[in-house]
Amino acid sequence: MPEQITITFPDGTEKKFPKGITGREIAESISMGLAREALSITLDDEIVDLSRPIEESGAITINTWDSEDGKYTFWHSSAHVLAEAVQELYPQAKFGIGPPIENGFYYDIDFGDQTVSQDDLDEIEDKIIELARNKNEFERKPVSKKEALDFYKKRDNEYKIDLIEDLEDGTITFYRQGGFTDLCRGPHIPHTGRIKAVKLTSLAGAYWRGDVESKQLTRIYGITFPKQKLLSQYIKQVEEAKKRDHKKLGKELELYMIDSMIGQGLPVWLPNGTIIRRELEAFLREEQKKRGYREVITPHIGNLELYRTSGHYPYYRESQYNPIQVEDEEYLLKPMNCPHHHRIYSNTLHSYRDLPLRLAEFGTVYRFEQSGELSGMSRVRGFTQDDAHIYCTHDQLKDEIKRCIDLTELVFGTFDMPVDIRLSFRDDNEEKYGGKTEFWDRAEQEIKEVADQEQLDYTIGRGEASFYGPKIDFIIRDAIGRKWQLGTIQVDYVMPERFDLTYVGSDNDRHRPVIIHRAPFGSMERFASILIEHFAGDFPVWLAPRQVQVIPISDDFNDYAFKCASRLKEKDVRVEVDTRSEQVGGKIRDAETSKIPYMLIVGSEEESSGTVSVRRHKKGDIGTFDFSEFISNLTAEINNKELPPH
RNA sequence: GCCAGCGUAGCUCAGUGGUAGAGCAGCUGUCUUGUAAACAGCAGGUCGUCGGUUCGAAUCCGGCCGCUGGCUCCA
């Protein structure tokens, strides 16, 4: 009798199988349907081929398209088929890396002198489907380091050689499907026939190993599916997402503009956008007032000496506008507010009794971002931070961090925005960071302790810290799934040293305060871009640039309409009357497309009874209300910052 | 900055070498309206920009500017 191993399934059940059984056989033992769907297995956290013999007991998950691991396998294999297609169409092509990603996969390819353009992708797609139909199996083959190197030396592929040189002999495997062999750890789907639909989504330059000094390869992005229908769904979904794009809605709703004569990456807030921004600021200002912040205003330029002292210059020199020469001095367009605030701190002598001192400012800063990096309101060269610096004693630090987390969570909670939280710590690259190691270790420890106490659901990002300290970052996705850092809370032991900040303790000695840098919105521009996409332009009433549109059904009711409007204006409601000589349907349509939350339709019935007929944006007619009742409902909705219905 | 794509009226877009178009918005007039588009007329463009090819360029080629997606970067 062959040796038995014990396999544990995700539901906790255990079963005995002969040693050396494969994932496929286990799947078949459950059902043939599952075996048909199976793409790979996850064995004790390692994803492996269905055909791999299992030699030891362990936990197994059979991966299908419905799981992350299954998709990962599927797209990983798809990258190989893409490469095979490219190899057939462009025999000179040399391959770099081709991993699966969140939505699909890519392959970095050196096409030599030939340029590949968008139009060529159709042909590659056709070839991929043709190769998929061959149902070629993915064959795993362990090779020695020498064999691997010889294979690629023969093919003159410096990229794979570069990769192999970092690998250990004995751990190297090749995978072959059809006529294409690739250096690969695996795993792969059983055969190419599982791929039924493909879309090559974009083409981009990508530096080899992410190094600007290295050669730029051509990156082809794609996505594949096991069913044609899933591709159509995906394409539809992408189109829907594009409708939420803040660049599109920002233009349609006249929220902001970017004008090349004003300057690249310098967004201008239009009247409608300005209303939203001022509401956001008022919201935060009020919360900060409750929490003991004191507001300050600092100038837009500062003496270069200020930034030399902070260390930002020349550390970030590449991404700052050039200094302005004034008489014998040089000034920098303010790239951040912190140094100004530190000087405000230094302006007076502080007792431990004064701390924490919380200085807040909606401070506009200018950074010279690379032109290729600019994007709508998300990535700009001039933006306003909802900045604050908290100067506290070390004893107060953890409590202050906690208070910052609470405030940030209140902000995102108010908009019901899903956030990812990242503790951004430093990595081993010492040159990137300032200050003493023991301070760093302490600050990271403290941040982690508070994050755990607050039961934050976080990930840790090594190498994501700023140069002066670790931070907690609040990260949000835009309409097309890109991640953007918005809120941030940063602990800083470095600037107090650099600016020689002190307070007098109860022992009558001078001590260093600790600084927390924090910005719940992060940047007003970036936050607005996410806000627009999050609500698809259908803002909560408290933020809507125009909250109410009064629609008289004919000129005869203009007087009543204006009477209603002026009573709303008394309550600070943003309201207009549509007196155009349009039909009611037309006025309603225009109000709907302008995404005005409330429409009040008034005619003889309403005028005679002192009521309004209320139509809610996207919901339609919600009935007739006594006008006073409508006002109190509306003001309550505004004051409670209620979210729109969906 | 690099790679790819794009740039025609205020907006959305059609127009692949032979007299610049449509819808919406705008203006003028008519209509006075009951829950997502009243009707008619008018006006609006050095086709991003500069250069080249051509008898002739929105259209083909090149430089530049800007935008979009990606790479790199992000205090």
Image: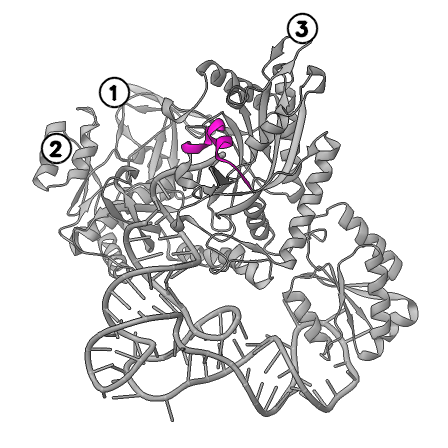
| Residue for badge 1 | A2
Does the segment drawn in magenta span residue A312?
yes
Compared to residue A579, the image places residue A228 above or below, namely above
Residue A507 bears which disc, if any?
3
Residue A149 bears which disc, if any?
2
Residue A321 on image: x %, y %? 44, 44
Segment colored magenta: A301-315
State the CA–CA distance, disc 2 to disc 3: 68 Å
Q: Amino acid at mark 1?
A: Pro
Residue A222 on image: x %, y %? 33, 51
- Asked if labels 2 and 1 share a chain, the reply is yes
Q: Amino acid at mark 2?
A: Leu
Compared to residue A117, the image places residue A153 above or below, namely above
**For the point 83% across and 54% down, which residue is it?**
A571
Q: Is residue A36 visible?
A: no
Q: Amino acid at mark 3?
A: Asp
* CB contact under 8 Å: marks 3 and 1: no
Q: Is residue A167 visible?
A: yes
Tell which subunit mark 2 falls on: A
Q: Residue furthest front?
A: A327
Instruction: Pick whichever, A262 or A166, lies toward us.
Output: A262
- Tag 1 secondary structure: loop
First of labels 2, 3 by sequence position: 2
How crowded pointer 3 is (Cα within 10 Å; few <14, some 14-19, many 20+) is rated as few
Magenta segment, prevailing SS (helix, strand or loop): helix
- Tag 2 secondary structure: helix
**For the point 65% across and 58% down, which residue is it?**
A272
**For the point 54% across and 55% down, which residue is it?**
A246
